């Protein structure tokens, strides 16, 4: 091979290697594309909080709902958050406080839907002519805007001395009406029949 042509070929190879190395370095040091540039959001945590607490106020400024958790982890793609040991408390003037808890849970972006899982429990304090009420299941969904708590899973209900089980449940905290559906079984104590609330059992 002609020495001059060999030298020219070496120069071309060197330039190509330099260009390739520069491109690689540019790509390696470029920051990740921001969401505003059309980047795809992934289901990864973008922030978290310990001893998390958020309250919803009514028009008078009084607390209507309070959501607390030992830990909250927020995800960027769907704006949902995972909760550890969550508790939802509903406050209404002249009404017993209702507390819903679970070992873990999730809450959507605007805190209007809270799902409670694993040893999920609802406790309505005694008051307003009603005995204490407790419901246990593997899952409860709290619909904050509708003031409703529901589950599609088997549930065990205790109201005073009365006990019932059902395949599903829907409780409206405004009307104080509880609907049990599916395979409903139980016994209502005579002392609980005259309570201020009501329970409707049926099959959907």
Image (spheres, rainbow, N blue to C red):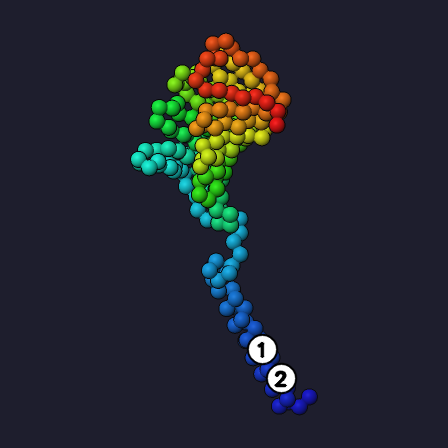
Are the residues at dot 2 and dot 1 in contact (C-beta closer than 8 Å)?
no
Left or right? Give the position of 36 relative to 138: left
Left or right? Give the position of 153 relative to 110: right
Q: Which residue is drawn at 48% across and 28% down?
A: 172
Mark 1 surroundings: few (<14), some (14-19) or many (≥20) residues within 10 A: few
Q: Residue at x 43, y 28 (%)?
A: 174
Q: Helix or strand or loop: what does disc 1 sit on?
A: helix
| Viewport quadrant of the C terminus | top right
The residue that label 1 is drawn on is 16
| Residue 117 image position (x, y, % from top left) | 53, 32
| Residue 67 image position (x, y, % from top left) | 41, 34
| Residue 199 image position (x, y, % from top left) | 51, 20
Q: Is residue 113 visible?
A: yes
Q: Residue at x 30, y 35 (%)?
A: 60
- N-term-proximal mark, 2 vs 1: 2
The residue that label 2 is drawn on is 9
Mark 2 surroundings: few (<14), some (14-19) or many (≥20) residues within 10 A: few
Measure the C-alpha gap from mark 2 to mark 1: 11 Å
Task: In the displayed orientation, state which residue is furthest to the left.
Answer: 60
| Viewport quadrant of the N terminus | bottom right
Q: Can residue 167 be seen in this view?
A: no
**Which disc number belongs to residue 128?**
none
- Where residue 2 sits, quadrant-wise, is bottom right
């Amino acid at each position: 091979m002609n020495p001059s042509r060999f030298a020219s070929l070496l120069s071309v190879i060197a330039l190509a290697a330099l260009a390739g190395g520069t491109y690689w370095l540019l790509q390696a040091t470029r920051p990740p594309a921001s969401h505003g540039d059309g980047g795809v959001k992934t289901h990864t945590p973008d922030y978290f909080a310990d001893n998390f607490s958020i309250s919803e106020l009514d028009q008078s400024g009084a607390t209507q709902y309070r959501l607390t958790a030992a830990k909250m982890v927020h995800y960027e793609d769907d704006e949902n958050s995972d909760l550890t040991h969550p508790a939802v408390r509903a406050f209404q003037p002249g009404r017993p406080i209702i507390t819903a808890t679970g070992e873990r849970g999730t809450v959507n972006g605007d805190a209007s839907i809270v799902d409670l899982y694993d040893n999920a429990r609802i406790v309505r304090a005694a008051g307003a002519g009603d005995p204490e009420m407790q419901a246990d299941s593997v899952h409860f969904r709290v619909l904050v805007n509708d003031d409703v708590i529901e589950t599609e899973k088997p549930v065990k209900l205790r109201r005073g001395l009365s006990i019932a089980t059902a395949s599903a449940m829907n409780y409206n905290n405004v009307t104080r009406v509880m609907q049990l559906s599916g395979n409903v079984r139980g016994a209502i104590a005579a002392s609980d029949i005259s309570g201020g609330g009501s329970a409707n059992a049926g099959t959907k």
